[in-house]
Image (cartoon, rainbow, N blue to C red):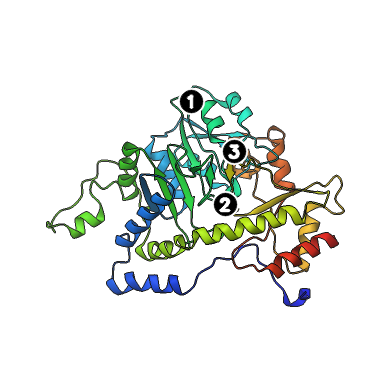
């Protein structure tokens, strides 16, 4: 076993190589660098992989979520339910629309939204809910839908859930929209980038127009058509949320590796679940076998009532040993902007607050080797 001085294990690392380099040569040689044929191909393959009819590549998961809310017509005065424990973007996009995010606490075992608490937060102003498939585990979508009025739209925040499934149905196909991230900490990456999926043709048509400034015709149709003088009309206020063909080409190469990435992550997640199950002060993630976890991150909870050190002290010890860790994520309801604007209180979201303080993401990515996992286990057991 290597000593700590020559070992550094990152919390996450993207896996790129010759395939991505070769893929980049096509748009560079053709000169089609902005959204074009490679993005279209990436969208087609991604939609096929996630069992959706439509997919729209974007600049990020954040812009995908905003595009979804805009497409369903969220406006000032509306309310959108979001989990209290998630990345800040889930709530930010609601505020972008002038609407109010209504926070709901999460479950301590799955880290996903607590379905039992949704009904108490529904009002006549509720127009949508954004369940988050946190760390790659799908939220309990059937239970969520059964707790909602029929007019409430469901937007999956599947930022972490590329390739995940729920009761044999793919993430991104479970709601009115699904939004994915290709940030380098995700399972596949395009540097920055995102994808919006849907099976609803009417929502798809709205999203496609809004993504491209609100233009009535696409860039491809305009540039490749027989009427070079044709300019689009703009009947709605849209956004420039388009992905480049450089990113689309990389995304295709990454998507071809997804199945192997997932197989390897699931193998080592199972290894973690077995290897550190004997440590009484570590609470492991829990989920039903109906959920096919994609393991974007392996997140545990430190029980500080019986642990030898606090969560933060454990993270420091691991860093000293060359092991990078992070908190799972934050309780958005506790962040300064939301406390000030919406008067949220920590006491209203006890599970999210506990997870913010006690969750711990251990390294899990496709550049790790068996020796890395064994070393992590050895250091944790030494604590």
Mark 3 or mark 2, which has the lower sequence index?
3
Of tags 3 and 1, the one toward the viewer is: 3
Of tags 3 and 2, the one toward the viewer is: 2
Residue drawn where x is 58% and y is 49% of the image:
136
Residue 363 in which image quadrant: bottom right
Left or right, residue 277 beside residue 75: right
Q: Which residue is mark 3?
A: 83
SS class, disc 3: strand
Query: Within 10 Å of the Cα at label 3, are there few (<14), some (14-19), or many (20+) other Cα atoms?
Result: many
Q: Are marks 3 and 2 in contact (CB under 8 Å)?
A: no
SS class, disc 2: loop
Residue drawn where x is 44% and y is 70% of the image:
20
Q: Nearer the viewer, residue 174 or 75?
A: 174
Q: Nearer the viewer, residue 255 or 356?
A: 255
The N terminus - image quarter: bottom right
Disc number at residue 294?
2
Disc number at residue 125?
1
Give the percent coordinates (x, y) of residue 127: 46, 29
Mark 3 or mark 1, which has the lower sequence index?
3
Query: Within 10 Å of the Cα at label 1, are there few (<14), some (14-19), or many (20+) other Cα atoms?
Result: few
Residue drawn where x is 63% and y is 44% of the image:
336
Q: Residue furthest top?
A: 124
Q: Are marks 3 and 1 in contact (CB under 8 Å)?
A: no
Disc number at residue 133?
none
SS class, disc 1: loop
Q: Nearer the viewer, residue 126 or 378?
A: 378
Give the percent coordinates (x, y) of residue 325: 70, 60
Residue 188: in sight, yes or no? no
């Amino acid at each position: 076993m290597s000593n700590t001085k020559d070992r550094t294990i990152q919390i996450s690392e993207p896996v790129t190589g010759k395939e991505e380099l070769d893929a980049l040569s096509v748009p560079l040689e053709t000169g089609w660098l902005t959204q074009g044929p490679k993005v279209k191909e990436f969208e087609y393959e991604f939609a096929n992989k996630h069992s959706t009819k439509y997919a729209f590549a974007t600049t990020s998961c954040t812009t995908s979520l905003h595009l979804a809310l805009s497409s369903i017509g969220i406006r000032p005065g509306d309310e959108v339910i979001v989990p209290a424990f998630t990345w800040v973007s889930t709530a930010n996009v609601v505020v972008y629309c002038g609407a109010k995010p209504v926070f709901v606490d999460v479950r301590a075992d799955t880290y996903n939204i607590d379905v039992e608490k949704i009904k108490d937060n529904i009002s006549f102003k509720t127009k949508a809910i954004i369940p988050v498939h946190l760390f790659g585990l799908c939220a309990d979508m059937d239970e969520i839908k059964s707790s909602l009025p029929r007019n409430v739209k469901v937007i999956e925040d599947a930022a972490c859930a590329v390739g995940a499934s729920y009761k044999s149905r793919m993430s991104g196909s479970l709601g009115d929209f699904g939004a994915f991230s290709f940030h380098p900490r995700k399972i596949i990456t395009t540097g920055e980038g995102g994808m919006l999926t849907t099976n609803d043709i009417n929502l798809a048509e709205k999203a496609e127009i809004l993504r491209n400034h609100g233009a009535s015709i696409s860039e491809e149709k305009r540039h490749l058509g027989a009427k070079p003088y044709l300019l689009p009309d703009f009947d709605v206020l849209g956004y420039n949320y388009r992905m480049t063909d450089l990113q689309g080409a990389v995304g295709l190469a990454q998507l071809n590796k997804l199945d192997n990435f997932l197989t390897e992550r699931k193998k080592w997640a199972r290894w973690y679940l077995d290897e550190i199950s004997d440590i009484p002060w570590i609470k492991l993630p829990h989920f039903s076998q109906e959920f096919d976890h994609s393991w974007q991150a392996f997140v545990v909870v430190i029980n500080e009532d019986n642990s030898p050190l606090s969560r933060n002290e454990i993270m420091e010890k691991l860093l000293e040993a060359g092991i990078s860790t992070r908190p799972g994520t934050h309780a958005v309801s506790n962040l300064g902007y939301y406390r000030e604007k919406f008067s949220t209180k920590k006491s209203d979201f006890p599970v999210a607050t506990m997870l913010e303080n006690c969750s711990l993401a251990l390294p899990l990515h496709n550049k790790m080797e068996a020796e890395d996992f064994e070393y992590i286990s050895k250091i944790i057991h030494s604590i």
